[in-house]
Image: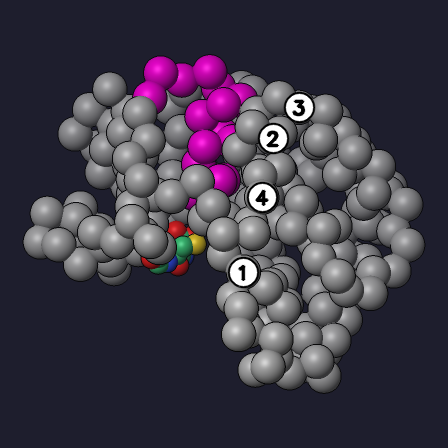
Amino acid sequence: MLTVWGRATSSNVQKVMWTIGELGLEHRRIDAGGAYGGLDSPDYLAMNPNGKIPVIDDGGTLVWESNAIVRYLAGRYGAGTLGPKDPGARAAADQWMDWMLTTLYPDWIATFFGLVRTAPSKRDPQAIAASAARAAKHYGLLDAHLAQSAYVAGDNLTMADIPIGSTLYRYYNMEIERPRLANLEAYYARLTERPAYRDHVMISYESLRATD
Ligand SMILES: N[C@@H](CCC(=O)N[C@@H](CS)C(=O)NCC(=O)O)C(=O)O
């Protein structure tokens, strides 16, 4: 049985759960992290020495790092669908997954943390606006790419869409300035039609909101 550890409100857990939903895999998810805690127990650290969520155990195969988990599940259970088989197509998916982690994510998470996970009295509006502007620039690059194809790595949903797509629900629901990006908006609208995206990514983050 595939087991996932991690609370449903974690964006990194959401990547894994969306992937599982797209692939229709039998699984169980155990709440961990945040208010649930448990990440510093010896048993947990034996699975993920980073003490972070998510981690999966798939019949004895342990994997941590959300993008690595998405790649593993796509390769094992979605070869030819979520997991591109051709090395060139695989590289196209990999490059966007790495781009999400190294380029988009730092500015996206800084915006989310600055605005939602920081109490109003401690917020730095200038820093939030600056990270949101940098994120918008990254989304602009993606918008230009999406003029050529319906999904990130071609005409169908692949693993490349999971990390990037998982940022968009929060991006479009935060009270920030956003430039009009028609291709990105159309892409986001396509994702919102997918049941697995609705079930696992389009969920409230209000329990994460810091208050004074
Ligand atoms: N690079 C890691 C980051 C993992 C991470 O930072 N997870 C956060 C949640 S999104 C966490 O474990 N936070 C501690 C907690 O939730 O208690 C990944 O992509 O899996």
Q: Percent position (x, y) of residue 39? A: 22, 54
Separation of disc 3 and disc 2 at Cα?
A: 5 Å
- Residue with the most extreme front position: 212
| Mark 2 Cβ and ligand 1 under 8 Å apart | no
Q: Quadrant of the N terminus?
A: top left
Looking at the rendered structure, the secondary structure element under dot 2 is helix
Separation of disc 4 and disc 3 at Cα?
A: 17 Å
| Mark 4 Cβ and ligand 1 under 8 Å apart | no
Q: Earlier in the sequence, mark 1 or mark 3?
A: 3
Determine the image quadrant of residue 68: top left
Separation of disc 4 and disc 2 at Cα?
A: 13 Å
**Dot 1 corresponds to which residue?**
209
Q: Percent position (x, y) of residue 53? A: 33, 49
Identified by mark 1, the residue type is Arg
| Residue found 76% across the figure and 29% down from its top | 190
**Dot 2 corresponds to which residue?**
197
Is 139 one of the magenta-colored residues? no
On the picture, is 52 further left or further right than 208? left
Identified by mark 2, the residue type is Tyr
Read off the magenta span: 13-27
